[in-house]
Image (cartoon, rainbow, N blue to C red):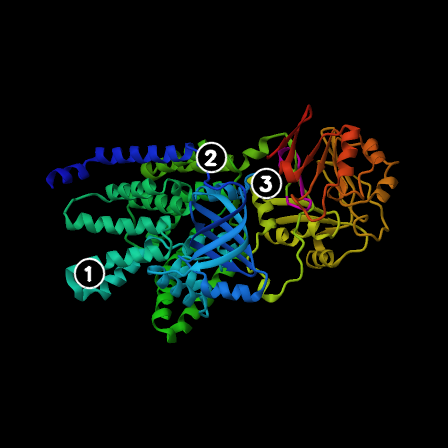
Amino acid sequence: MQNWKAILQSNRFYFGILLITFIVVFVSFFVPRKSEYSLGTVTIEGKVIDYKIDGNFLSMIVEAQEKVQTFYYFQTEEKKLYFLEHLGYGTTVKVEGIMESPESNSIPNTFNYQEYLYYQNITRILNADFIEITEKAHGIYVFKNSLYQYLYHKKYGDYLLAMVLGNTDFLDHSMVRQNGISHLFAISGMQITLFAKILSKLLKRFGSKKEIGIFFLLWFYAFLVGFTPSVLRAVLFWSYQQFNRKFQLKLSRNQIFVFVLCTVLFFQPFAVMDLGFQYSFLISFVLMQMHFYKNYLKSSLQISVVSFLVSLPITASNFYSVNVLSIIWNLFFVPFVSFVFYPCCFLSLLFPFMEWLLGWCITIFECVNVWCASVSFGMLVLPKVPLVWWVFYSVLLGLCFYQKKVSYFIFLIIFLLVLKYQVKFSNHAYVYFLDVGQGDASVFISSHQQEVILIDTGGKITYHQEEWEVRSQRIDQGETIKTFLNSLGISKIDIMVLSHGDVDHAGNALSLLQQMEVSQIVMNRNSKNALEKEIEGEYSQKVEDSISSEFFQIEDFTIDKVYDENDASLVLKISIYGNSFLMTGDISQNIEKKLLNENIQSTVLKVAHHGSSTSTSMAFVKKIKPSYAIISVGENNLYGHPSIRTIETLEKVGVPYFLTSQDKTIWFEITDKWMKAFRLQ
C-alpha cells in the first residue's frame, strides 16, 4: 500500500499518464474512422441513446453496429403521439431509410455539422422512411424515461428539463448566449457540489456509509444527464477526493484534477473538442490556482473576470463575439441560478405545491435576461485568427495572473485591439457568394473593411402546416450569416440590398436586422409584397430607393414600372479595382433584352433566377462577356435548377461557372493588380 501511495504522490506518475493520454488523443485524431455501413438503402436495429421530437420532426441517435444520427418526419399526428408515448432512452428500434454521409458547413467559419457528429463518433446519418419500436426500454432507462416525461409535461417543463437533466432542447438560447450566460444551463461542478451537500444532509443518519450512497446517487445522476464532460469532471473529482480522503493518500487538488482529466480523455478522446469540456476543465483548473479575496463581492467579481478572460479564446474561436458585460451579468445570474433557481427546481419536484416559487424565479430570470439583452454596447466582435494568436494571448494572460505587473495588462489590451482590428489593415477587397441553399446572398467588402454591402439574405420557403407539425426551433440562417460576418471581424452592415421580396432572397432580412446593426436598406422601386412591406414598416427610417457607395462604383440598371415580382428585381453592376459584378436577381429574358443596350459588360455574372430556363439568354451572356458565372442554387431542389439550357449556354460561350450546390460558398479576393477565385468545397 505504501508503494502505491508513493507512486500516486509522485509528479512523475502524473506526467506519465498525461503523456499516455496525449498519445491516445493524438492517435484518435489521426487514425481515420471508417463506417460499418455502406451508403444507400439500409435497415438497422439498435438502441436509442438520445432523441428529440419537435413538431413533425424526430431526431435520434441509434446505437447499432455504430452510432447513427437518424432523422424522420411524421406523416400523421397519430404517429407522432404514438412515438411521444412509447419512444424513449434505451428503446430498441428498427429503422429503414437512406444512409448518407453528413455534410460539412457550406459557409466558411460557421457550424460544421460533419465535424460535430464525428467528434461524437458518428460518421453516418440515416434519413428514415420507416421506424418501428421493437422493444421497450428496461432497467434504469425506465426511470430516466419516466422522469423525462414527467418533467416534459410539467408547467415549466422547458426550464425543469434544462436545470434538472441538462436538456436545453426546448429553450430559446438566443438571449442567454448573447448575454454570455448560456453556461448556466449546463449541469456543472457547482450544481454537483450543491447536490452532493444536499445528499450529505439527507443521508446524515447513515453515518460513514453515507459516502457510498452519495457515490451511487451522483453516478446515477450523471447517467440521467447523459455523462456530459462537465458532469463527469465534477462527479469524478468528488469520487477521487473521497478515495483520497478514505485511504489518506494526501494527493493535492492539482493531482486529482490531472487524474480526472486523463480519465475522461482516455475513455472519450474526442471530448477535448466539446465546448463543455473546454470551458469546464480550463476555467476550473485556473480557478484552482487562484487566491481569492475574503470579501464575497470582491471574490465574485474576481471569479467572473478570471472566468471571462480564460474562456475568451474558446468563445471567440467558436462564436467570434463575446459580451464584455457578461462579467457584470454573471455577478447576478451565477448566484441566483445556483442558489435560488436550481434548488427551486428540485423543490417544485419534491413539493408540487411550491411550483409558484419556481414560476417566480423564472419571471425574475426572464425579466433580467431581457433587460440585459437590450444593452448591446458590450458586444465585442473578434475575427477568426490562427491558433497561435490565442496561444500568445494565453501566455500574456498567464503573466498577468502570476506577475501582476501593469505592463503585462497593457500588453494584453494592446494585443486584443490588434487582434480585433488586424483585418482592417488589408487593402484587399472581397466578394462572397454564400451558399444559402435555394436562395441568394452575396457580400461585398471594400479594402480595409471600410464598407460592407449585403445583397439579398437568402431564406427558406415555408408551407402551411398544422399546429402539431410546427417546430419550435429551426436553424436560423440569418444567425449563420451573422456568424460568418463576425468571423471576418464585421459587426455592421453598411448597406443591405434586397433585390426583391421573394422569401429566398429576403427571408432572412428581419432576422439579420434584429441581430446586426444595418445603416441603410435598399429595396426595389416597384410594387412590394407583404414581406417587403413588413421590413419597410419596421425600419422605415433606414429604407432608401437608391444606392450609393463611397468605396464601390455602383450602376443601377433596374427597369422600373414592372409588375412581375421577379422582373422587378434590382439589377446592379458593382465595380472595384477594375473588376465588376453584375447582380441580376431573378430577372427573366424579357428584362435581359431591355438591358442589351446598357453598359453591362462585367467580370462576374451572378446568373439570374438560380439558373432557371427563363433567364440567361445567349445574347445576354455574350453582351456581358463574363470571366466567371455564379449560380446560387440549392442541392436537389424541387425546381430542377439550374436548367440544362442555362448550363449549355454558359458552356457554348466558354464561361467558367460555379454552382453553390456543388462548390458551396464561392469568393473572390481582389487587389488593384489581380483577382483570384476560391471555393469552399
Magenta residues span 436-449
- Closer mark to the observer between disc 3 and disc 2: 3
Q: Would you name the residue on which mark 2 appears?
A: 415
Give the position of the N terminus as an image quadrant: top left
Q: Residue 434's x, y, as percent?
A: 64, 41
Callout 2, which amino acid?
A: Phe
Spatial separation of the CA atoms under disc 3 and disc 2: 28 Å
| Secondary structure state at the residue bearing disc 1 | helix
Give the left or right position of residue 234, taking residue 546 as reference: left
Within 10 angstroms of label 3, few (less than 14), some, or many (20 or more) residues?
many
Image mark for residue 107: 3
Q: Amino acid at mark 3?
A: Ile
Amino acid type of the residue tagged 1 in the rendering:
Lys
SS for dot 3: loop
Q: Which mark is residue 210?
A: 1
- 174 and 333: which is toward the camera: 174
Residue 320 visible to an observer of this rendering:
no
| Residue 71 falls within the magenta-colored stretch | no
Residue most toward the bottom? 353
> Mark 3 or mark 2, which has the lower sequence index?
3
* Residue 117, horizontal then vertical, whole percent: 47, 44
Residue visible at 65% across and 43% down?
Answer: 635
